[in-house]
Image: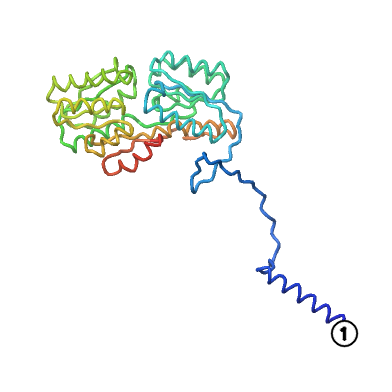
Amino acid sequence: MSRLKVVSLLLVSVVLLALVGCGGKAPATATKPAEETVAVQPTATEKVAPTATQPQVTQAGLVFGMSVHANPAEDSFWGVVERGAYDAANTYGIELKSGGSSDPNEQAQLVETYVSEGVDGIIVSLANPDALRDAVKKAVAAGIPVITINSGVDVYKELGALTHVGQTEFVAGQGAGEKFNAMGVSKVLCVIHEEANIGLEQRCDGLTDTFEGEVERFNVATTGTRDIAGTLASIQDKLTSDESIDAILTLNPDVAMAAHDAIQAVGRDVKMATFDLSPAVLDAIEAGEISFAIDQQQYLQGYLPVVFLYLYNTNLNTVGGGLPVLTGPGFVDKSNAADVKALAEQGTR
């Protein structure tokens, strides 16, 4: 063998030994490296989920307006709806304007304000469709996509909304009636806390449809959720004057706690259930003081419409196929209250 060949072999051996010394084999084939990403380290005060990655938010340049039939700052149910809407808006880089009023004329005026501002989408609840009809139609005529939430499942198509996000109130009421039948009660007081709210009436209608005993509607709209102490006093007086009432169905979690306290005050065995959740309601379910709650997952009623309007604006996607997007009803009782309670305490249930 020539000296040149020996030197060449020695050089090859040195290279191979160097590769082995570096701790690995040479790749069989070359692959294109992944694009480099830069991770931003959180500060000491920032909370980061242990397993979830942070969303990559790009400002969409879209503005949506939400108008509901209550003030979210004063109503625990609507506070969760608003939380869902803001969470979705933050995820997709959307500017969200939110407000509401129990006065349907004020609610309609807010919709008209959004129309005049030229927002890219409107989310609206239709507890009083007649009062909101003209405002919603004005939005649709202006080319602004509208999604109705919570109340309005029977009229959203007529008004030109893209879809409706909520539950079928009559069906939910039917479910409550069936559960009261199983409890063996004979007379249920269905407490209505808002005037002219068709959704509340439909809940009591559904209860009446399936409950085998007597249903009495009891209107506390003059106090409602604005004056819980007054609502509590009205329910307490009703229970005192009519001892045949052995069950109560409330249609709001704040009113539920007023009814709960009224039952405690009269000191007799009255079963109760409610629509919608709050941490206090879930505590009472765990304690056996409220039998069940009907859950329409109001967080989704805020979150999903923002996503749907984003997709419509950016990709002309529509959801529902001519049918509403149902978020309920579901039922929470002692068997699952603890799991849901942890989420309610975070403001998402």
Crowding around mark 1 (Cα neighbors within 10 Å: few <14, some 14 to 19, many 20+) is few
Query: At x 28% / y 25%, what residue is drawn?
Result: 255
Q: Identify the residue at the far front of this view.
A: 44
The image quadrant where one finds the C terminus is: top left
- In this rendering, the answer to whether 62 lies above or below 112 is below
Q: How many marks?
A: 1
> What amino acid is found at the position of numbered circle 1 in the picture?
Ser
Q: Residue at x 37, y 24 (%)?
A: 75
Q: Is residue 262 left or right of residue 172?
A: left
* Residue at disc 1, secondary structure: loop
Viewer-proximal residue, 4 or 141? 4
Q: Is residue 93 left or right of residue 29?
A: left
- Residue occupying image coordinates x 67% and y 69%: 25
Which quarter of the figure is the N terminus placed in?
bottom right
Where is residue 116 shown, x and y percent of the image? Answer: 56, 15
* Residue at far bottom of view: 1
Task: Classify residue 28 by image quadrant.
Answer: bottom right
**Residue with the mark numbered 1:** 2
Identified at 27% across, 40% down, the residue is: 333
Q: x, y (%) of residue 221?
A: 29, 17
Q: Nearer the viewer, residue 160 or 114?
A: 114
Q: How is the image coloured?
A: rainbow
The x and y percentages for residue 132 are 44, 17
Q: Position of residue 155 (x, y in %)?
A: 41, 23
